[in-house]
Amino acid sequence: MSEKRRLPTPHAGVDVTDAVCPMTFVKAKVALDVLEPGQILSIRLSDGEPIRNVPRSLKDDGHRVLGLTDNGDGTYDLLVEKGQD
Amino acid sequence: MTTDYKALKAGGFMRQVQKDRFSLRIKVVGGNLTTGQLRTIAEVADRHGVGHVHLTSRQGLEIPFIELKDIETVKESLAAGSVDTGICGPRVRTVTACQGSEVCPHGCVDTLALAKAISDRYFGRELPHKFKFGITGCQNNCLKAEENDLGIKGGYVIEWQEQPCVYCGICAKVCREGAIFASDDEIRLDPSKCNHCGRCVKSCPSDAWKGQSGYILSFGGLFGNRIYTGKHIIGIQTDLETVFRAADAALDFFKLHGNPGERFLAAIERTGWEELKNAVQAAVLAPSPAPSQAGAAA
C-alpha cells in the first residue's frame, strides 16, 4: 500500500452537491472566476453525473485537475488549479 | 387500367384505407433533412396532401393523402426541391442514425457520415425481405442498434497512458462495467470487462485515456411481430472498410439463404448462426486489396 499522494492545500472551496447539471459546472466556474491563475479550488461534487462531466469540462476550459478525494459519503473533493485567463 | 400497387409501393407510395389515396414516403438518411427540403415537403403537403406530414418510427417522413392522379406531379415537385422519394418492400430500407460524434458529446463515431456511406452503398438493394440498418454513436444506444437487421454501434478501443495520468480515479468511478481499478499509484484495465463505452476517455481530465473509434456490429435484430435483440458475433472493428466487408457478407448471406418473404433472422436461424458467423468472419479477415500504383509508390 503506497502512501497517499500529497495534494496541495486549496485557496478556496465550493460545494456543488446541491446543484444539478449544468449548474454544477456553472457554480464551479463562478468560484474559479475570483481566483488568480495558479490558485487552487476544492470542489465538493456528488457521485454520478457531476463526477463524469465536471472534471472534464473544467479541463476543457483550460484548468488543471490535480486530484480527487473520496469522502466515503457519496461526495468527492476535486482539486483544480486555475488556468491562465 | 389497373393500378400497379406493387410498383407504387416500391417507389414509396403507400396505399391508404381511402380509395386512390397514398401516403408518400420521403427518403431520409440518418434522420437529417435540410430546411430547404422541409420547405419543399411543406409546399407539396399543402398543395397535394392535407396540410400535415407524418414522422415515422424510423426517422422517415410521409406525406399522406396524395391522390393517384397527382403522383407524377408530386414526384417532379419534390425532385425540383432536391427531395427524393423513399422505398418500401423487400429491399434495404432507410438507414437511421443518431447525431453522433459531430454533434453529441457522448458520440464515439461520426454516425451521419457512416449512414450516408451505408445508404449510398446499399439503399434499395433487392433482398428476400426488408432489411434495416441502424447506426448509433455510443452505448447509450439512442438509435437502438440491436433492433435492426444490421446494427452498428460506435465505441472506443481504449488505452491508458501513464505519463499524463494524475491518478484521480475518475475513470474507475465512471466505468459501469467495473473494468478499471484505480489507486493512488496504479491504474489497471481488465479488457475482458470493457464494453467500449468510452466513458473513461470522455471523462478523463488529463487525457491519459486514449480512445480509437470503433464499430460494434449486431445481426438479425427484429422489433415487429417478433422481437429479437441482434447478436454481436464479431468483436469491435476499428477499420471502416472491414465494416463494409462484414455488411457485404451479411447481405450476400441473406440473398443466398433467405426465402422470399423471410426476414434475415429467420434465414439465419434456418441456416445456422455458425454459418453466418463463418461468412462474416471470413470477410472481416479477408486480406486488404492489393495497393494501388499510387499507394505502392508512396
Image: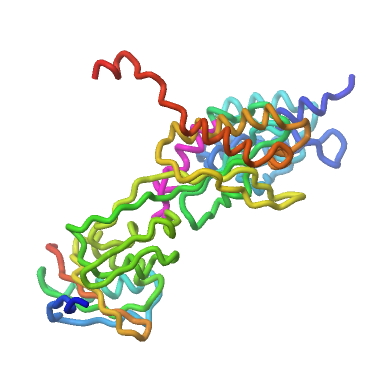
Camera-nearest residue between A20 and A43: A43
Q: Position of residue B60 (x, y in %)?
A: 63, 42
Residues B96 and B108: in front is B108
Nearest to the observer: residue B28 or residue B97: B97
**Where residue A48 appears, x then y in whole percent?**
40, 73
In the image: residue B166, left or right of residue B220? left
Is B36 displayed left or right of B62 in the figure?
left
- Name the spot of residue B123 as percent of width and height, x first: 60, 30
Q: Is residue A64 left or right of residue B129?
A: left
Residue B93 found in image quarter: top right
Q: Tell me if residue B55 can be seen.
A: no
Residue that extends furthest to the top in the rendered view of this protein: B293
Which percent across, then down, holds residue B259? 77, 31
Quarter holding the C terminus of chain B? top left
Which residue is pictured at 62% across the width and 45% down the height? Answer: B148
Q: Residue at x 71, y 34 (%)?
A: B88
Residue name at image x 46 percent, y 32 percent: B285
Q: Does residue B228 appear in the picture of this structure?
A: yes
Q: Above or below — where is B84 with respect to A30?
A: above
Quarter of the image where the N terminus of chain B is located: top right
The outermost residue toward the bottom is A73
Q: B272 or B133: nearer the eye?
A: B272
Over which residues does the magenta segment extend? B99-119
Is residue A28 positioned above or below B95 on the image? Answer: below
Residue A77 magenta-highlighted: no
Query: Would residue B107 be counted in the magenta stretch?
Result: yes
Q: Does residue B159 lie above or below B280 as drawn?
A: below
Q: Residue at x 58, y 52 (%)?
A: B144
- Residue A10 appears in which quarter of the rendering? bottom left
